[in-house]
Amino acid sequence: MNNDRIKRFSLVERISHWMHTVSFFILVLTGLVVLTPKFHFLASLFGGVQETRIIHRVAGVMFSFGTVLLFMIGDNPAFVRWIKDITTWGKEDVAFLKEFPKEFFGGHANLPEQGRFNSGEKVNSLLILIDGGILTITGFMMWYAESIPLGLIRWAYPVHDLAAFIMIAVIVAHMYLGLLHPGSKEAINGMLSGTVSRSFAKLHHAKWYREVTQKEKSK
Amino acid sequence: MADRMSVLFDASKCTACQACSIACKQWNSLPAEKTTLTSSYQTHQTFTPQTWTFITFKEVWANNKMEWLFFKKQCMHCAEAACLKACNHDAISHTDKGFVVIDHEKCIGCGYCVTNCTFNVPRIHPKTNKAYKCTGCPERVSNGLKPACVQTCQPEALVYGTRDEIMAMAKNRLEKIKPLHPQAVLYDAPKLEGVNFTYILLREPEFYQLPNDPAVPVSVDIWKDFIRPFGGLAIAGAVLATTVGFIKTRGQTTEHDYASPKGKEVGKDE
């Protein structure tokens, strides 16, 4: 680690994130074809409507089991730490979330110190995990519709739709914050090269920065 | 629909000759299908992509009498059709006579109509990937002919006419048969704004495994009337919020006021 950057995400974390991203975009594009005839033209990207439906399912498996298993098995310590992080909540998180809209819309916010993941990132992770889980379950229900009781399968459609809309809305905000928002766009480097600038880490994840630099000093 | 036509199936006249099944196959060039021999005359247990109508046989011993009840199954051609509402591709519509038809140019075989149909009628063909069901014989009807099944029915258990004629006829017939069949009912489905295939049943609907007060499944209504528009709004909202955020943060650096117990240094721009 050189002097002005600090390691944020391992190779496995990054690969699994981008695998998730790619499969997500494929799912959205293929999903749009089935959603409404207005997007039927997208089917030609995939070679036809039936091919689109098959690709949607393949991408679905990649999106759910593929990325989760890769992360869980490929970098289990990081996976466990991630789950711990996103399920640990305190007063500071409430304070952060209350102040965050000011930050989002260009005002000056009074944000408490954050750990490796700030409160917003924790919310994002939880939403993706839960919403993604719902999409996966309802998706597999529709895939095997003939084996599911009618009363149950009929609810899979509206729930899958709702979860998909929510996921897209969340990802719009997620991409914006990672790529364009001045306060946070350094974060994308964490997912590309695996490192972020020390000044970014000091500012945005002070608690985590202290833990990491203490470990560095003790080596 | 002034021109709305209907078919009446009168269970008190049906002899279960099954000529209607055959007429449907012949008119629509559908092949016969291999079925399993059971202890009943009933040849088909369920719809298939190539069997759009069949007769069910139910034997009942009641009041020291043997009753053999017949029922013709096919698409009910609901005025409020759940399949139509569930279809994402505008492939299902009503003809001007009120029959529900699937446009196979548009159908992508997603199967949403199959699972959401109130009566579980349409079926997807595994090779063509399209949904199939009784069409109401639009090419016959638009040329002034009766649907094939109605045309062939010898005991006149099937009658075709305008909706008003059919409903009046049904009510009259019901009165007439009440002495012999006191439990007879007219099955019409008010929640679906009526079905174009109306029935005089000799017993209550549950006996024929028909839903008692059929309606479009609640999930379909919630799905199309609430979740879809809400979802669109949610995404539009996210796009709007990020656009506003983008505009309002132009010219900003990463400077923020992060609280820090070590003093203001950590919180300032570097």
Image (spheres, coloured by chain):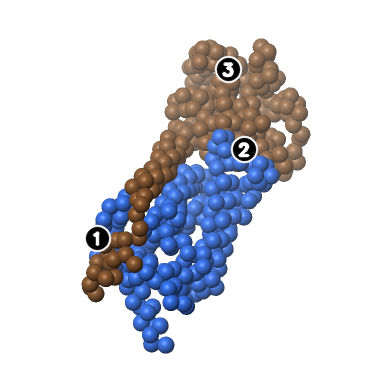
Chain colours: A blue, B brown
Rendering quarter of residue B130 = top right
- Identify the residue under disc 3: B97
Rendering quarter of residue A129 = bottom left
Amino acid type for the residue under numbered disc 3: Lys
Q: From the image, state whether disc 2 or disc 3 is nearer to you.
A: 2
Rendered position, A17 above or below B183: below
Rendered position, B138 above or below B50: above
Per the model, the C-alpha gap separating discs 2 and 3 is: 32 Å
Circle 1 chain:
A
- Identify the residue under disc 2: A41
Rendered position, B96 above or below B86: above
At label 3, counting other C-alpha atoms closer than 10 Å, the crowd grade (few under 14, some 14-19, many 20 or more) is some
Q: Position of residue A60 (x, y in %)?
A: 57, 55
- Identify the residue under disc 1: A110
Q: Residue at point 36% right, 50% down?
A: B250
At label 1, counting other C-alpha atoms closer than 10 Å, the crowd grade (few under 14, some 14-19, many 20 or more) is some
Rendering quarter of residue B147 = top right
